[in-house]
């Protein structure tokens, strides 16, 4: 056992937590939409064909915003294909995932699903094969009240009132050679600027996110952000980041340890901080007081189902099984640590979307005609989404650590604290990265109430880090009660098991 400390003070708040940090991603890819969230004929399906069991799990997950319809799919998508009578919609070859797109789920169907769940939509426009004109037409179709050809077309399709979609992504991963119609940073920066300008003229109330680099290790990272923002800085609200956590195969000379896997939490913290620095450098160059916000609109663990048959199947199939990553207890711990890190950057990171929601690198899995279940990574996300309300407090962590080749000494303790003045509840999120030793942790909550009561305490731990959940054993890895918490005034003490993710929620009984 080793000792560690966590200290916060109410007077040292970082920023209000934007609840859109708990977003997800739905792309027309594999079985995410078809035979995922949408399966007509399933015993739980509603009148529009959306699975009720998946809808209930999505509500339990606590997702607040959902990015749609892509992803790489977006760069070849014609929005007109997904509106109007279903029997008249064209079948298309999807060059992003080498599949056949039936367009049976489109704008209105997806908006029905969003309303059913109670989740905010985040839509994207195609800046691959298309451009500013199609983007402003799509926005007019969705958001203009009426009296024009496009808004009246929407009304003829059964949506009398505007759809009210407020958050829009300007393309997807336009720096990537895998992208349909990849662009240089200057090409993309120019088209992003002009698209944003036209879209704001149609609806000034929208929020817009420009594409940052597809990954921190892209050769063009940094240069891409600088050149893109040189063009569109004044016209956008957010810059996107994407990151997928990997574990190199054994025998390739890289560190395959769990400790190195968990160090990607710090790698992504650096990614956020470096991107903020670049954006602020552009602001300085432009003599601007504006501080751009970040949208981490794709993130997850993804390395097993990333090649070969997992990526592409022959014959242009409909809804093939692609990218169906099976997650382990080890993956869930990394997701928990990533959530603590993202909350600790709440001053600039305002939106994030776990990719994806269902079947495709997802927290929810389904079988056609059969059950839906929670993958291991479902749990830390759902816990954070449920309890993280209010302001993120600056955390002081005092913990022994371990050596990492990229980042030096890393503490075993990863932590974030979110306090809600409206309810008096304080949520503490904790990851013990030590694989074999228990952590004796002292938590000091200064100025948050002299007396506190315990509201919730859970831990996610498995003796087997490779354990996963399946249709036959859906709860093999699931939260359990965290026992033995001592509360004395503003101090808490608890013992955390090795390799565990923990959530402790307390509430002030009376003011300090």
Image (cartoon, rainbow, N blue to C red):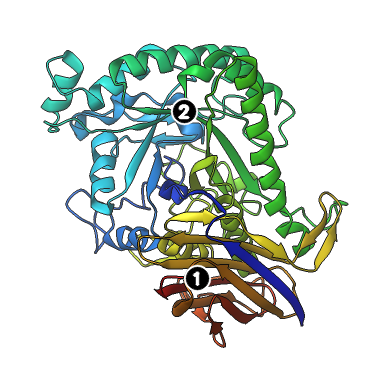
Query: Regarding mark 1 in the picture, which secondary structure is present there?
Result: loop
Mark 2 surroundings within 10 Å by alpha-carbon count, few (fewer than 14), some (14 through 19), many (20 or more): some
Sequence-wise, the earlier of marks 1 and 2 is 2
* Residue 220 placement: quadrant: top right
Horizontal arrangement in the rendering, residue 132 relative to residue 47 (left or right): right
Q: Would you name the residue on which mark 1 appears? A: 470
Q: Residue furthest front?
A: 512
* Residue 262 placement: quadrant: bottom right
User: How far across and down, in percent of the image, does residue 341 sit?
Assistant: 61, 53
Up/down of 197 relative to 508, above or below: above
Q: Would you name the residue on which mark 2 appears? A: 237
Label placed on residue 216: none
**Residue at 84 percent of width and 52 percent of height:** 254
Mark whose residue sits in front, 1 or 2: 2
Horizontal arrangement in the rendering, residue 126 relative to residue 289 (left or right): left
Q: Residue furthest bottom?
A: 484
Residue 327 visible in the snapshot:
no
Residue 500 visible in the snapshot:
yes
């Amino acid at each position: 056992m080793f000792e560690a400390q966590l200290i916060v003070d109410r007077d040292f708040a970082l920023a209000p937590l934007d609840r859109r940090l708990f977003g997800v991603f739905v792309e027309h890819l594999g079985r995410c939409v078809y035979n995922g969230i949408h399966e007509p004929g399933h015993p739980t399906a509603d009148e529009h064909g959306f699975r009720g069991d998946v809808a209930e799990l999505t509500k339990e997950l606590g997702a607040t915003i959902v990015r749609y319809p892509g992803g790489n799919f977006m760069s070849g998508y014609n929005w007109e294909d997904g509106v109007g009578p279903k029997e008249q919609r064209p079948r298309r070859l999807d060059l992003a995932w080498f599949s056949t797109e039936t367009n049976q789920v489109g704008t209105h169907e997806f908006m029905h699903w969003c309303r059913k769940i109670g989740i905010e939509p985040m839509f994207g426009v195609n800046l691959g094969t298309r451009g500013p004109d199609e983007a402003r037409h799509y926005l007019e179709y969705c958001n203009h009240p009426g009296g024009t050809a496009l808004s009246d077309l929407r009304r003829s399709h059964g949506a009398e009132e505007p759809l009210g979609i407020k958050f829009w992504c300007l393309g997807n991963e336009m720096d990537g050679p895998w992208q349909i119609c990849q662009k240089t940073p200057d090409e993309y920066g120019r088209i992003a600027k002009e698209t944003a300008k036209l879209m704001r003229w149609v609806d000034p109330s929208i929020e817009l996110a420009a594409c940052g680099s597809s990954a921190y290790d892209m050769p063009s990272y940094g240069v891409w952000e600088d050149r893109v923002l040189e063009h569109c800085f004044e016209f956008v609200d957010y810059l996107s980041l994407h990151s997928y956590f990997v574990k190199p195969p054994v025998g390739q000379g890289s560190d395959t340890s769990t400790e190195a896997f968990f160090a990607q939490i710090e790698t992504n913290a650096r990614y956020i901080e470096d991107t903020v620095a670049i954006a602020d450098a552009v602001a300085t160059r432009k003599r601007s007081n504006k501080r751009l916000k970040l949208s981490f609109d794709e993130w997850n663990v993804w390395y097993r189902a990333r090649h070969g048959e997992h990526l592409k199947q022959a014959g242009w199939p409909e809804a093939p099984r692609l990218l169906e990553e099976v997650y382990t207890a080890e993956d869930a711990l990394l997701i928990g640590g990533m959530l603590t890190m993202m909350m600790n950057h709440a001053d600039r990171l305002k939106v994030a979307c776990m990719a994806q929601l269902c079947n495709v690198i997802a927290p929810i899995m389904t079988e056609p005609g059969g059950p839906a279940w929670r993958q291991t990574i479902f749990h830390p996300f759902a816990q954070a989404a449920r309890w993280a309300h209010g302001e993120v407090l600056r955390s002081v962590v005092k913990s022994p650590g371990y050596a990492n080749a990229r980042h030096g000494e890393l503490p075993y303790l990863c932590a974030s604290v979110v306090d809600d003045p409206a309810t008096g509840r304080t949520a503490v999120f904790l990851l013990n990265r030590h694989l074999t030793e228990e952590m004796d942790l002292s938590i000091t909550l200064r100025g948050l109430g002299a007396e506190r009561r315990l509201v919730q305490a859970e831990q996610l731990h498995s003796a087997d880090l490779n354990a996963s959940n399946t249709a036959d054993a859906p709860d093999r890895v699931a939260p359990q009660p965290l026992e033995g918490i001592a509360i004395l005034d503003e101090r808490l003490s608890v013992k955390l098991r090795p390799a565990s993710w923990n959530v402790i929620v307390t509430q002030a009984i009376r003011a300090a």
